[in-house]
Amino acid sequence: MPEIVDKSSITKVCVDDFAFRKRYTYGTVMVDLETHRIVDLLDSRETGKVEEWLKSYPNLQVISRDGAQTYASAAKNSHPEALQISDRFHLLKNLSEVIEKYMYRLFPSRLTIPATVQNPEMQALYNTRNRAERICFARKKRKEGYTVNDIALLLHSSATTISRYLAIPEDKIPEVRENVRERQHLQQMEKRQAAIDEVRKLYSEGHSINEITRITGHVAKTVKNYLKKDCPLSGGRYDHRLPGKLAPYEQDVIEMRAKGITYTKIHEFISQKGYSGTVASLRVFMQKERTHQKSISQKEEGVEYIPRKTMCQLIYHKLENVKGITSDQYDAVIKKYPTLGQLYSLLKEFHRIVFSRKSDELDSWIETAAKLNVDELDSYLSGLRNDIEAVKNAISYKYNNGLAEGSVNKIKLTKRIMYGRNSFMLLKAKILLNEYYYQIN
């Protein structure tokens, strides 16, 4: 196919990969940063082929690309004097994903914090799952100075029933037992703790990670996780709920149930707001909610929880734009988990540096971030250090890879139109002809 563009006239480009078949075969697209048009396509993203391809453009002065080592090496070998620029979007995106990955590894699906608002009705709801707990709760409140009528109002019961609870002798009070789900979780935590202790004992005796994997049967990644000081006992998926029909109305259900309103009445109320589920789903939800609150209230008095997914949203959005968390709750989370607050601050500071055009501030930011000793963050910092010149150029110059990202979408659209009947050369010809003759931008 004859060349449409004069290669010697191209001086500033951005390159990116696109998929012929996702996860299997890829190509590379080159876009002119000055004309905003696709210049060329290559049916590979291997370093050697990309290097030869770039050499065919003799006057390249600026090469914008993502952080992939393939393009970094190819650009360096083909045009050592050219200005390499890492893509700002990927720098910010990768840092956000690193923090989110850290949160999913270390934090439970719901973070517990001290209750920001003390609510006796809510406390009564969570601490009275069955008769045994209702008796214990009534006796506890009586010792705190509550009258029989006050306790009856909290439990939405009669004064006669409360008097009967208080009259039960100490040795006749039923024993509070965990349900099956709680017992299974406790057993799993004990089993995990034993596995962690075994791995750490073997490591302290001088066994290598490979030897420990053979002895215990754990994969190397699991062994490394068990050796970390911050290895959590509970998996990140425990107590995690997928959003369902009830998700938008959960807080309404909790508050109304705390006031003693029946499930039927609650169902009628939220159905008017758009809920299409059953009454039984409300009962199941409240039982799980009370079980969860009971498990965390055994460790801390007066607690509430914040979903981990809500805290992850704060990576990408401002506090005032995230539903389900108040400023008081945010302050409580940061107070309890200070590393999380430091990561949020690092992310904001990195955003500021990237758009400030002050690349000399990056080194001090990297030093500050390294002091946190977060594994996921350390891996990200290692990538920055290996490509520090291109990263600093991304801060200092206006160029970015946005044009290449948009061009990939254009290629995908054309490829799908030609599905089943296009070779690479036909795809390339159609793309370039559209660019230069029909001026599609």
Image: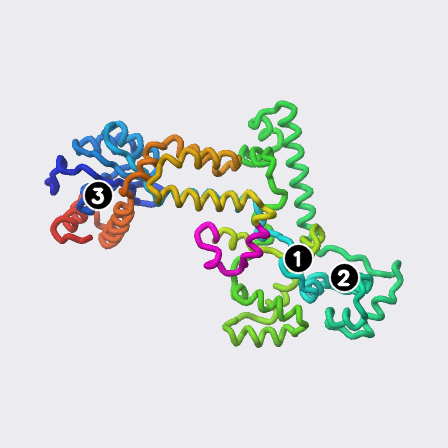
Label 1: which residue?
293
Q: Which residue is mark 3?
A: 33
Measure how far apart labels 3 and 1 are at the Cα level. Answer: 56 Å
Q: CA distance from mark 2 to mark 1?
A: 13 Å
Tell me which label, 2 or 1, sits earlier in the chain: 2
Label 2: how many Cα within 10 Å (few below 14, some 14–19, many 20+): some
Label 3 packing within 10 angstroms: few (<14), some (14-19), many (20+): many
Identity of the residue drawn at 18% across and 42% down: 39
Amino acid carrying mark 2 in the image: Glu
User: Which residue type carries mark 3?
Assistant: Leu
CB atoms of marks 2 and 1 within 8 Å: no
Who is closer to the viewer here, 238 or 326? Answer: 326
Position of 226 with respect to 46 (left or right) is right
Which residues are the magenta region? Answer: 314-333
Seen at 36% across and 42% down, the residue is 354
From the viewer's side, name the closer residue of 153 and 182: 153
Tag 3 near tag 1, CB within 8 Å = no
Residue 292 visible here: no
Q: Is 315 colored magenta in this rendering?
A: yes
Residue under circle 2?
133
Between marks 3 and 1 in the image, the one whose residue lies nearer the viewer: 3
Badge 1 density bin: few <14, some 14–19, many ≥20, Cα 10 Å: many
